Image: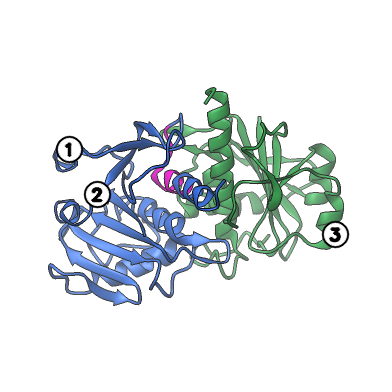
Chain colours: A blue, B green
Amino acid sequence: MIRFAVVGHLASTDPGFSLNDMPGGAGRMDILCRCVNTSLFLSHGLRRDVECYLVLNGGPSGPKTVLFSGEQVRYLSPDERSAGALIKKALGVPAGLAFRESTPGVFVRKGGLLELVKEHRFAILDERGNDIRSAPVPDDSFLLSDHMDLTADEQALLEGAPRYSVGPVTIHADHAITVLLNQRDREAAGL
Amino acid sequence: MIRFAVVGHLASTDPGFSLNDMPGGAGRMDILCRCVNTSLFLSHGLRRDVECYLVLNGGPSGPKTVLFSGEQVRYLSPDERSAGALIKKALGVPAGLAFRESTPGVFVRKGGLLELVKEHRFAILDERGNDIRSAPVPDDSFLLSDHMDLTADEQALLEGAPRYSVGPVTIHADHAITVLLNQRDREAAGL
């Protein structure tokens, strides 16, 4: 199992956000939707061994966490609107402290990074870390940030976390996921 | 300069296509929009040395080719709708045999792969090629296909083209672009 968690610092928790304005009114929800895509999609199928957690810290009721399970998800297409529509449905479900399924393979709960780091030990993908090609990465849970840097409070929650870099230039979170999975695919194939 | 060309076998050439239905009515235009994103976007900037050609083979007036120039493009955001909106504007411009600028850094012309292969020698990115990590890739122009395989006619136009693979599993065209650019970034940085 490989886990990705992406922090959406402004990402809306309003189920009424517009699929036509995900970069604006929905608080860069487009980034999170592309991370769902790059985490889960193969050319003709899904990565069944990957989970993608979206931490939505925006108003009006954040933080909430939406989980896409590669093993169980249905009704997901690669385009941004498809992931966005499933996130909207998840946000429309009354959320408690435990994950609740909103559509097949998509789950939602109250709480954000504070709760998530109690359950999984995350490594951080960022440009200051060790190159993922320099040695096989032992971790299986990876945290990324959206267009904003992790806050001081978030950094404190992740104190001591290993840091890995996917390359020499700073790229978008969704692109970093693609590069990491390529490296994992190669290692699994003995390349 | 690195060039990507992506063949959209069903991609609409109707400027009236709906941004709300790019996977359906617009003939998997969502794939082409994501290829624009992965070709051109860095975390805080654009890849100024990359060009992305979209070959739109769908009705009613295909083939047409839309070019996004990383050096010149403006008004482009990373989300699919943003690229889609610029493609719609390009399709609304009367197109001739020469590229004509529709918005800054976006160009359109009549004609498709037949014309493009006369101007650039393309290598093909597909899973049967040589691993891009096995030796530095000398090519700078790369062709990819959307969700459909290249047709026999298209294969004939590309006879003798080098083929490169980005990894051991078959991934989407936009993801393959990300992996190739990561390899190029590493080579440029001496990694």
Residue placed under numbered mark 2 in the picture: A10
Residue placed under numbered mark 1 in the picture: A159
- CA distance for labels 2 and 3: 48 Å
Q: Is residue A175 magenta?
A: yes
Magenta stretch, residue numbers: A170-178
Chain letter of the residue carrying label 2: A
Which residue lies most toward the top here?
A: B190
**A147 or B138, which is in the foreground?**
B138
Residue B37 vs A110, above or below: the answer is: above
Q: Position of residue A173 (x, y in %)?
A: 39, 44
Q: Residue at x 43, y 63 (%)?
A: A81
Amino acid on which the number 2 mark rests in the picture: Leu
Closer mark to the observer between disc 1 and disc 2: 1
- CA distance for labels 1 and 2: 23 Å
Q: Is residue B77 magenta?
A: no
Residue placed under numbered mark 3 in the picture: B153
